Image (cartoon, helix red, strand yellow):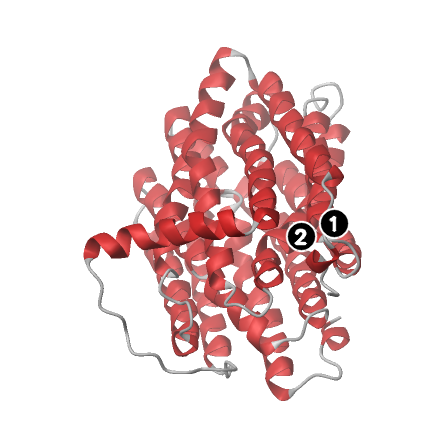
């Protein structure tokens, strides 16, 4: 697969493609284990439903703060690589202490820290890809490397789920090992050369300006770019629907379905991973031909089927696997659209501003969605919340799919 994305490219493009593949492969163990986190907290560490809802809410909320990590990158190519590497180091460091700590609140803080730096490094990483790789090849390389990571995640998740069912305490060693493996990706990224690494003298500004400017610039960017604004509000509505159902997912799976770690691993990794891996190359090809707003609409419609299908699983457990397979299909497109929308909308501009808005908006919807979803799950029940989340995704997808997009929003423009 990787050979497909490494042909007819400049040396920096080939090196970046290899770094992209290795980054996905080395990051996948921790990313896969992170998917079990709510279950580890709820089933083995005795965390309350409140703690699970709080974790679900805090993960996207800290994304708002991570917005500041990349806010000073505009026009400073010399800082891109360091920005990404330091984010990668700090997001893994707390998990290295897991073998000696079994306090649920420490694990929650480590998870929140992971999400902060995971999101914080994305704008810089996307700008590196934009500078080092040509359009078209960038999208294919990104989708293939993500598909490879997901394929690895399928195997890891099944193995981890089976071992955790046998000995739940093994999560401590798993977190340590997966964090250590992830640190190897920093050495790979450190060997890359970033095109256009110009040095810019740091600007001296007040603390107030430091806090306010990123938000002011983001608001101005959305006012100046109606197409980008439509994309953001469409993603906001669909993302809010997905955030809304997060607290319901764990309670639904444990209390309604009573599934084991291995069954959950089969749903998340085999079904979802298969959907992601099979659909990613198809989304990538479509991404090269279809305007991004229409592409986003199709993605959101696909994602909206997940909670609707999942609500049918009490009747037959196969609906659980069908739902997660289709969620993987939607995620294959969403992963591509969310990460590469910045470089596409930016054109010849610095893309970190655009990706930074993506990060900030993800945090804003996370500030409300999980808390509201947790409350509605208690008041209504998880199935009703799942259906509501699906309807929001459908609404967003239908609106964006009908929006008339300029040809300039196509990747091939």
Q: Position of residue 352 (x, y in %)?
A: 47, 63
Q: Position of residue 110 (x, y in %)?
A: 35, 49
Asked whether 323 or 10 is in front, the reply is: 10
Q: Position of residue 42 (x, y in %)?
A: 44, 31
In the rendered image, the quadrant that contains the C terminus is: bottom right
Residue drawn where x is 52% and y is 34% of the image: 243
Callout 1: SS: helix
Instruction: State yes or no: discs 1 and 2 in contact (Cβ < 8 Å).
Output: yes
Asked whether 20 or 390 is in front, the reply is: 390
Residue drawn where x is 73% and y is 74% of the image: 5
Q: Height in image: 365 above or below 248?
A: below
How packed mark 1 is, by other alpha carbons closer than 10 Å (few <14, some 14-19, many 20 or more), is many
Q: Height in image: 328 above or below 395?
A: below
Q: Which mark is residue 321?
A: none
How packed mark 2 is, by other alpha carbons closer than 10 Å (few <14, some 14-19, many 20 or more), is many
Q: Residue 70's quadrant in the figure?
A: bottom left
Residue drawn where x is 45% and y is 23% of the image: 372
Residue named by callout 2: 154
- On the rendered structure, is 336 left or right of 193? right
Residue drawn where x is 71% and y is 24% of the image: 313
- On the rendered structure, is 49 left or right of 238? left
Is residue 61 visible from the viewing direction of this image? yes
Is residue 325 visible from the viewing direction of this image? no
In the rendered image, the quadrant that contains the N terminus is: bottom right
Residue named by callout 1: 274
Q: Position of residue 349 (x, y in %)?
A: 53, 68
């Amino acid at each position: 697969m990787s050979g497909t994305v490494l042909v007819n490219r400049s040396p920096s493009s080939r090196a970046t493609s290899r770094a992209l593949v290795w980054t996905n492969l080395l990051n996948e163990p921790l990313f896969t284990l992170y998917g079990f986190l709510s279950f580890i907290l709820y089933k083995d560490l005795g965390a309350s439903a409140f703690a699970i809802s709080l974790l679900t809410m805090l993960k996207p909320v800290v994304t708002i703060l991570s917005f500041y990590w990349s806010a000073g990158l505009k026009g400073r190519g010399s800082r891109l690589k360091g920005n990404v590497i330091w984010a990668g180091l700090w997001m893994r460091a707390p998990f290295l202490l897991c073998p000696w700590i079994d306090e649920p609140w420490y694990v929650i803080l480590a998870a929140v820290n992971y999400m902060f730096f995971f999101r914080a490094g994305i704008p810089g990483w996307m700008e590196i890809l934009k500078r080092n790789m040509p359009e078209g090849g960038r999208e294919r390389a990104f989708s293939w490397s993500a598909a490879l990571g997901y394929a690895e995640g399928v195997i890891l998740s099944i193995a981890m789920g089976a071992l955790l069912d046998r000995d739940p305490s093994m999560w401590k060693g798993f977190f340590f090992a997966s964090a250590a493996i992830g640190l190897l990706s920093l050495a790979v990224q450190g060997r890359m050369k970033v095109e256009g690494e110009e040095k810019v003298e740091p600007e001296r500004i007040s603390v107030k300006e430091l806090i306010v400017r990123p938000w002011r610039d983001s608001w101005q960017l959305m006012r100046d770019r109606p197409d980008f604004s439509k994309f953001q509000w469409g993603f906001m509505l669909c993302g809010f629907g997905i955030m809304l159902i997060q607290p319901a997912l764990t309670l639904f799976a444990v209390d309604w379905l009573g599934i084991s770690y291995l069954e959950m691993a089969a749903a998340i990794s085999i079904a979802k991973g298969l959907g992601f891996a099979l659909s990613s190359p198809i989304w990538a090809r479509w991404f090269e031909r279809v305007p991004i707003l229409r592409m986003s609409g199709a993605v959101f419609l696909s994602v909206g089927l997940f909670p609707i299908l999942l609500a049918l699983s009490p009747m037959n457990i196969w609906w659980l696997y069908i739902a997660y397979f289709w969620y993987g299909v939607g995620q294959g497109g969403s992963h591509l659209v969310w990460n590469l929308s910045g470089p596409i909308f930016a054109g010849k501009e610095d893309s970190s501003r655009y990706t930074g808005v993506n990060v900030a908006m993800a945090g804003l919807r996370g500030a409300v969605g999980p808390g509201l979803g947790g409350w509605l799950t208690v008041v209504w029940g998880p199935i009703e919340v799942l259906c509501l989340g699906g309807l929001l995704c459908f609404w967003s997808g239908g609106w964006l799919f009908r929006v008339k997009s300029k040809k300039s929003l196509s990747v091939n423009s």
